[in-house]
Image (spheres, grey):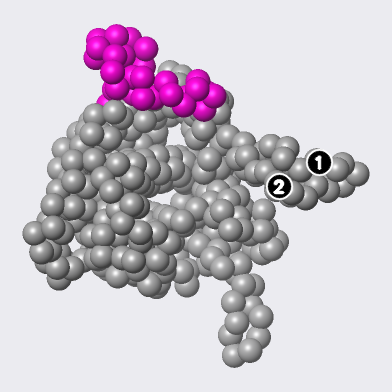
Amino acid sequence: MSSFFSKASVRRLSPVIRDTVDKLCVALETHRNSGKPVVISSAYSGFAIDIITEYCFARSYNLLDDQTFERSYHHAFSKARSGMHWIRHFPWMFNLMKYLPRFLAAKINSGMIALLELQVELRAQVAEIITEKEKGYKPEDTSHATIFHGLLDSKMPDEEKQLKRLGIDGFSLVRAGTETMGSTLSIITYHLLSKPATLEKLRSELLTAYPDTSEIPPGADLEKLPYLICSPPWFLNSGRLIFGHSGVIHEGLRLAYGVGTRLQRISPNEPMVYGDWVIPPGTSTGMTAVLVHQNPDIFPDPMEFKPERWADNPRLDKYLLSFSKGSRICVGINLAMEELYVATSTIFRRMNLELYETDITDIAIKYDNFTPKAKLDSKGVRVLVK
């Protein structure tokens, strides 16, 4: 799976990402000067799901065709997460919901119904691709490489190419590629719109580099902009070690956290030593990115959105856990970063947005529902398009 998310693979997908960002901007433009708020959190979810379904199946869901952004699954994901504590300890509950009458399942968790229906739809998409493969599908039959066509053409064991397994993979990819992307872009948007000086600094950098707002540069070019991105925190130039400056994207990732819950690890045979503590083999041990990202010893004023902090200490990158670290790092990191680069740079060059009845409580983590969740009555990040 990792080969489909390599930097080279993601850069080949870049035209799809840029076209989808352009479509998002066109949809937002329809609300210009309407005086009606847009739930941009839902718009971002639609943007993310359109990209991941196109990449998985060569069949985008085209949720951005609905310019009200009501088909984005944003609310369904949010409601479904409220049951994650139960499902984490009793995973059979998710399967049980499939067999309950719809009216009863909806009373338990209405968001879960939408996710179960999505799971059925995605399984059907995978089944179609398997059928195409059996009828002689060739990779050149699609406009770009896709994950599931590629998996079926790979050297994976046949038992791992069965519909049951690939259907689960499809649902996991779409859900993972949608939730965290939507929340991270929403958090970046809130902080930029609530801090005009920060927004102006970013916009100035973007317009100086790319004054033609109709142009959508790829992530490979945007990586060179220091205020937008601090990635990597250092690079070599003519043999000299040069440190990057600051990063709106990195600061957004820090305050979005990625996964909010504790991720469990077990050392099966050897004890783990942490300071004066010796943790016996076989002990389940977990930590959360939230505690690291909010640690004032690492990030002074941790709840403040300060892109400049990455200039003051370029080595902070090792404490950024939004995608985890090491061998269990999120396989989709390159796709996520490309989407963040292109979406953030394009929207804040092209669009003039203003927050509408949205404050910090609409994005600040209040609950751990596997992914971070704000207050229960939050309506998301809402904006007016000027």
Identify the residue position indicated by label 2 in the image. 267
Q: Residue at x 43, y 55 (%)?
A: 332
Segment tinted magenta in the rendering:
85-114
Q: Are marks 1 and 2 in contact (CB under 8 Å)?
A: yes
Instruction: Confirm whether residue 18 shows in the render.
Output: no
Within the magenta stretch, is there residue 93?
Answer: yes
Q: Position of residue 66 (x, y in %)?
A: 16, 38
For disc 2, the neighbor class at 10 Å (few under 14, some 14 to 19, many from 20) is some
Is residue 221 shown above or below 363? below
372 to 307, vertically: above or below: above
Question: Which mark identifies residue 324?
Answer: none
Residue at 35% x, 52% y is 160
Q: Confirm whether residue 148 shows in the render.
A: yes
Q: Main secondary structure of the magenta part?
A: helix
Q: How far apart are the two marked residues, 1 and 2, measured between alpha carbons?
A: 9 Å
The residue sitting at the right extreme is 276
- Kindly identify the amino acid type of the residue bearing the numbered disc 2: Ser
Query: Which image quadrant: the N terminus?
Result: bottom left
Q: Which residue is mark 1?
A: 279
Indicate the quadrant where residue 46 lies.
top left
